[in-house]
Image: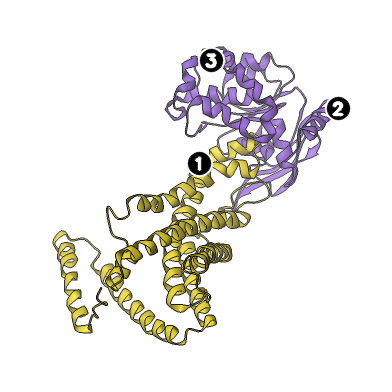
């Protein structure tokens, strides 16, 4: 197999011409998204350039502490995005969601590094940063779906929830249907993507490994392992995020504190 | 949550403590808006009290305070002599049956709605009562095939009767009714009132505008008069 073809800045600049397609559609249909799309493309470019330059340094130094610090920043940024994305109060939810994300991603990534790749250095930059990033990205999406589903369902079905309390349910018994619903909603996209993977689309990691010139069977092994890591990571982070936020969301009477949401 | 022995102990105590519900100097506010101020009420065992008053006078709030679904800013609620606070509220709710205004029965069939409370550990010992469902449906003029119908598709009157049956099956000693017959026709209002008339051991605290309730309740308490503090 051949190694990957490098993309020069001029070639990449040519790729930006593809953006004329969505831009033309937006202008033709008067879709008011030109500004947002433009900002998103600029942000993507700057962020990835910055990360690319930073990762070059991180990979060259390959210092476990520096790698861990970078992972910590990734988890922190994901944490803020989740809490903001769910419309929840930062002051209340930042710490429990951080713990849920850190613990929920650490377990599958370290199993991947230690048991599957059998790396003696579980903090090797070349592996730990991309793997953690992939698991974390999926956990972020799942956590937003799970937490939003949980708190919005509780607010929408407040009468039913209160009725369960009035009928003698413990807090856990009264919350069980909402926990189930949140876990189902958050894990459904991952389950659906596992069920159709390879048929509907070739996943990013597998495509990357194939483009790098690796045998497709090795690429498939990596993809299976990362999908399992993502699935277990998302299940664990959503479960932990729900349980860890409960203490800050309900009073001793079992009532949902109305101040869980950020005022709009 | 209480164990079964604790529930038995509480039931024993009910017999020796006359006031089923006591509310002392109750004040409730939602933000800046004060709903109740210095509200007092004592409901004795077996008594049927009707709460009356204009909309917004806090009738439903009184019931929610008893259930621990609204925490008063000031004052005390006692159920069978036991103050309702953050630690005792879970046990206190086991004395209370509640039929809310415009009940939302949630998803699932009527059978699932009626069975749901018996999955809670505190109600497990009452599971045998599920066998009485057909008889209760018949008593409140509901067909048995309703059990397999989606609860969300029921009419307002059917939902009220299903919510009432659900409360009856739990055999609570104090029943809180919030406009529990507002969507019923005259025949069914009479049936519901008759049920409570024939159950002298039950303590009832009801909010209603229906004349049928005024007939069988022993006392009417007006919240409009008691809003600024009033006699027991």
Q: Are marks 3 and 1 in contact (CB under 8 Å)?
A: no
Q: Nearer the viewer, residue B128 or B14?
A: B128
Q: Residue at x 62, y 47 (%)?
A: A255
Select label 2 or label 1 by which is in front. 1
* Rendered view: B99 above or below A86: above
Q: Name the tint of chain B in the rendering.
A: purple
* Rendered view: A262 above or below A14: above
Q: Residue at x 32, y 69 (%)?
A: A209
The CA span between labels 3 and 1 is 28 Å
Select label 3 or label 2 by which is in front. 2
Q: Residues within 10 Å of mark 2 (few under 14, many from 20)?
A: few
B135 sits left or right of B142 in the view: right
Q: Are marks 3 and 2 in contact (CB under 8 Å)?
A: no
Please state the total of marks drawn on the protein image. 3
* Rendered view: B82 above or below A44: above
Element assignment for label 3 = helix
- Mark 1 = which residue? A157
The CA span between labels 3 and 2 is 35 Å
Q: Chain of mark 2?
A: B
- Mark 3 = which residue? B188
The chain whose colour is yellow is: A
- Mark 2 = which residue? B16
**Residue B161 appears in the picture as rendered:** yes
Select label 3 or label 1 by which is in front. 1
Residue B196, numbered label: none
Element assignment for label 1 = loop
Q: Residues within 10 Å of mark 1 (few under 14, many from 20)?
A: some
Residue B67, position as x, y percentages in the image: 67, 38
Q: Residue at x 86, y 27 (%)?
A: B16
């Amino acid at each position: 197999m051949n190694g990957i073809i490098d993309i020069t800045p001029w070639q990449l600049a040519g790729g930006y011409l593809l953006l004329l397609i969505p831009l033309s559609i937006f202008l033709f249909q008067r879709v008011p998204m030109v500004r947002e799309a433009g900002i998103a493309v600029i942000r993507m470019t700057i962020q990835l350039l910055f990360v690319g330059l930073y990762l070059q340094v991180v990979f060259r130094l390959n210092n476990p502490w520096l790698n861990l610090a970078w992972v910590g920043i990734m988890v922190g940024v994901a944490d803020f995005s989740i809490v903001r994305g769910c419309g929840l109060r930062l002051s209340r939810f930042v710490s429990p969601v951080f713990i849920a994300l850190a613990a929920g991603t650490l377990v599958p990534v370290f199993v991947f590094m230690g048991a599957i790749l059998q790396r003696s250095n579980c903090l090797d930059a070349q592996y730990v940063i991309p793997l953690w990033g992939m698991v974390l990205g999926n956990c972020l999406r799942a956590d937003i779906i799970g937490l939003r589903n949980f708190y919005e369902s509780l607010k929408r079905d407040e009468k039913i929830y209160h009725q369960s309390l009035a009928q003698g349910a413990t807090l856990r018994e009264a919350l069980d249907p909402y926990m189930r619903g949140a876990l189902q909603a958050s894990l459904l996209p991952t389950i659906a993507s596992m069920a159709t993977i390879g048929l509907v689309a070739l996943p990013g990691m597998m495509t990357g490994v194939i483009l790098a010139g690796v045998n497709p069977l090795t690429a498939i092994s990596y993809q299976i392992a990362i999908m399992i890591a993502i699935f277990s990571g998302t299940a664990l982070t959503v479960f932990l995020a729900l349980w860890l936020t409960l203490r800050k969301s309900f009073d001793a009477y079992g009532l949902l504190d109305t101040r869980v949401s950020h005022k709009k | 949550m209480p164990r079964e022995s604790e529930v038995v102990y509480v039931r024993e105590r009910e017999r020796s403590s006359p006031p089923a519900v006591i509310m002392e100097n109750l004040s409730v506010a939602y933000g800046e808006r004060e709903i109740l101020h210095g509200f007092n009420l004592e409901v004795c065992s077996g008594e049927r009290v009707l709460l009356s008053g204009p909309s917004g006078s806090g009738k439903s709030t009184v019931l929610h305070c008893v259930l621990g679904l609204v925490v008063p800013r000031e004052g005390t609620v006692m159920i069978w002599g036991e103050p309702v606070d953050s630690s005792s509220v879970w046990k206190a709710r086991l004395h209370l049956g509640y039929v809310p205004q415009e009940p939302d029965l949630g998803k699932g069939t009527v059978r699932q709605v009626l069975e749901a409370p018996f999955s809670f550990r505190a109600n497990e010992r009452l599971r045998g009562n599920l066998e009485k469902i057909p008889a209760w449906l018949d008593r409140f003029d509901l067909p048995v095939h309703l059990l397999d119908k989606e609860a969300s598709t029921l009419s307002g009157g059917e939902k009220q009767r299903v919510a009432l049956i659900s409360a009856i099956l739990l055999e609570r000693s104090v029943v809180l009714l919030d406009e529990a017959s507002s969507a019923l026709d005259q025949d069914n209002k009479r049936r519901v009132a008759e049920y409570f008339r024939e159950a002298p051991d039950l303590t009832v605290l009801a909010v209603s505008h229906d004349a049928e309730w005024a007939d069988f309740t022993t006392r009417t308490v007006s919240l409009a008069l008691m809003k600024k503090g009033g006699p027991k």
